[in-house]
Amino acid sequence: MKNSYDVIVVGAGHAGCESAAAAANMGSKVLLITMNMQTIAQMSCNPAMGGIAKGQIVREIDALGGYSGIVSDSSAIQFRMLNLSKGPAMWSPRCQSDRMRFAEQWRLMLENTPNVDFWQDMVSEIIVENDKAVGVKTSLGIEFHSKAVVLTNGTFLNGVIHIGEKQLGGGRSGEKASKGITEQLISLGFDSGRMKTGTPPRIDGRSLDYSFMEEQAGDEHPGKFSFTDTKPLTKQLSCWITYTNDEVHDILKTGFDQSPMYQGRIQGLGPRYCPSIEDKITRFAERNRHQLFIEPEGWNTVEIYLNGFSTSLPMEVQQKALEKIPGFKNAKMFRPGYAIEYDYFPPTQLDLTLQTNKIENLYFAGQINGTTGYEEAACQGFMAGINSHLKINSLPPFILSRSDAYIGVLIDDLVTKGTDEPYRMFTSRAEYRILLRQDNADIRLTQKGFDLGLISNERYTAFQEKLANITTIVKAIKETSVSPEEMNTNLESVGSAPIVQKVKAASVLSRPNVSLKEFANADVYASINVFSIEEQEQAEIDIKYSSYIQKEQDAAIKQSQTENIKIRSDIDFKNIVSLSSEAKDKFSKIKPQTIGQAARISGISPADISVLMIHLGR
């Protein structure tokens, strides 16, 4: 049995899978260790990918050469583009997934990735020599050696499952917790904490009456995540919407005296933006109902995920409350909802490559860093896999800035600000939302993926053709004039003022309620309609929002002036006399790598930054 590798990845959830694939595709020999080979890429919570800001992350991973977008497209049962009533900066793709197909596709892709080996076992210890990670030990007593280790332990580190007054050790339902790693890391000087997440009961869809619910169908013309040649859906499964009511709330309240959350048995903080149903009826007591989404788990299963009803109340209370929900009178549970509490390590102990500050060549990714969500985990694993490969080959690190990608925003937030509650990505966290759209993820990032060796020559050639086509469309619209005869009928149909003489097509397209469809009778439309819908949409956005895009690009360039001022790694901040005590402590702990990062640390004043710049000779 081979026991020496370039990179060992511990855990095969979304972070671990992307990490193993990235490092392997860049040329590292990778060992992926998981406690259960049958649950690789398991969707532990809802069977869906994407959503607000999360969909942008999936497209960014795909644009760089990761697998999440391809897997999501191949296992989707429904696709929707969210926020279409808002500007394109807010458009966010989301798909319902077939849970079993999603995990199967991930495993097949990993098994077909050269350089990836698998081992089923529990990692109980990291082998550390001279403050450097050099391998792992497993519960079977086996030692695997490597040049780098990536920890993607999810909710398994000392995981405890709570259902009412019952407590079970486990990383998720039916699977045991991981022991030993937390204790070792604490002994090595790491700070740790506890977090909580939860999941709703799973329901037998045959026991529901959908006539009491509102249907939520997929898009009429469904899109997809990947910029590769994956196929969009031709048929879709609907989701459904129903609501809680006062009777449901009253029944839930009867279980509060047995609630692990309210009785103090759970110490960790839960996700603020995905609260349990008991949290909702307490925090929003003025509301007499809460929306619930009935989400099918796949094409060939009757299992239903009840989104919006996450709970850790006793099973009997869950069942009684469910039966009072419209359409759920005869509902049968497959398994109850539960809360899970687990260890995490505040991410301020990492640098921007996700390498730990205390142990060289040791990387953390996913929920171990205090995040929540498949997409947040996947992008961290992807970046840790890339950077572990680069580090052991003495190559420069790969770091995305806040103006490059939502991935850059997420990692910068974690490393610079830390988090004491499960971190979830939102569009509001990004300063440059107009630059970081889902539609242009490939334009922003595919060149970077190609430079890393993660994008094939064939895909890169197709990408360059797309760029050329977009340029052609933009040029045609900017240089061609349209007449009243060509435009006015369609302009009036959308409530836009008619034109009285020939004007440039770009000036008409810049109107808020006008799209390329309104140019159907114009000669210019024939010249651009030969290109793909995606290319036309990209060109339209570039023209319609050009002034806003330019404004954000200018702001990003200005910000980069401080972002690019490097801080030497050997600086002893405590010896810089004029720094405030808070700045000395936080700089010493977080070890910012640039002036821009230092300025974003909570509690750091402009005066501290001035002192630091003077010390650096600026």
Image (cartoon, rainbow, N blue to C red):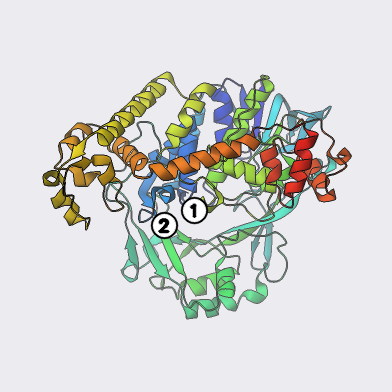
Q: Residue at x 60, y 65 (%)?
A: 312
Quick one: SS at disc 1? loop
Q: Is residue 228 left or right of residue 46?
A: left
The type of residue carrying mark 1 is Asn
Q: Is residue 366 left or right of residue 291?
A: right
Asked whether 350 or 444 is in front, the reply is: 444
Where is residue 5? Give x, y as percent.
67, 22
- Contact between marks 2 and 1 (CB within 8 A): the answer is yes
Rendering quarter of residue 323: bottom left
Cα distance between the residues tagged 2 and 1: 8 Å
> Circle 2: is it few (<14), some (14-19), or many (20+) Cα within 10 Å?
many
Quick one: SS at disc 2? strand
Q: Is 391 above or below relative to 208? A: above
Residue labelled with disc 2: 295
Q: Residue furthest left?
A: 485
The type of residue carrying mark 2 is Glu
Where is residue 96? Give x, y as percent.
41, 50
Asked whether 142 or 486 is in front, the reply is: 486
Q: Residue at x 63, y 38 (%)?
A: 11
Observer able to see residue 593: yes
Asked whether 175 or 108 is in front, the reply is: 108
Any mark on residue 46, and which?
1
Rendering quarter of residue 391: top right
Where is residue 79? Give x, y as percent.
36, 48
Q: Quadrant of the N terminus?
A: top right
Observer able to see residue 15: no
Rendering quarter of residue 362: top right
Q: Is 67 above or below relative to 98? A: above
Q: Is residue 79 left or right of residue 565?
A: left
> Circle 1: is it few (<14), some (14-19), or many (20+) Cα within 10 Å?
many
Q: Quadrant of the C terminus?
A: top right
Asked whether 371 or 303 is in front, the reply is: 371
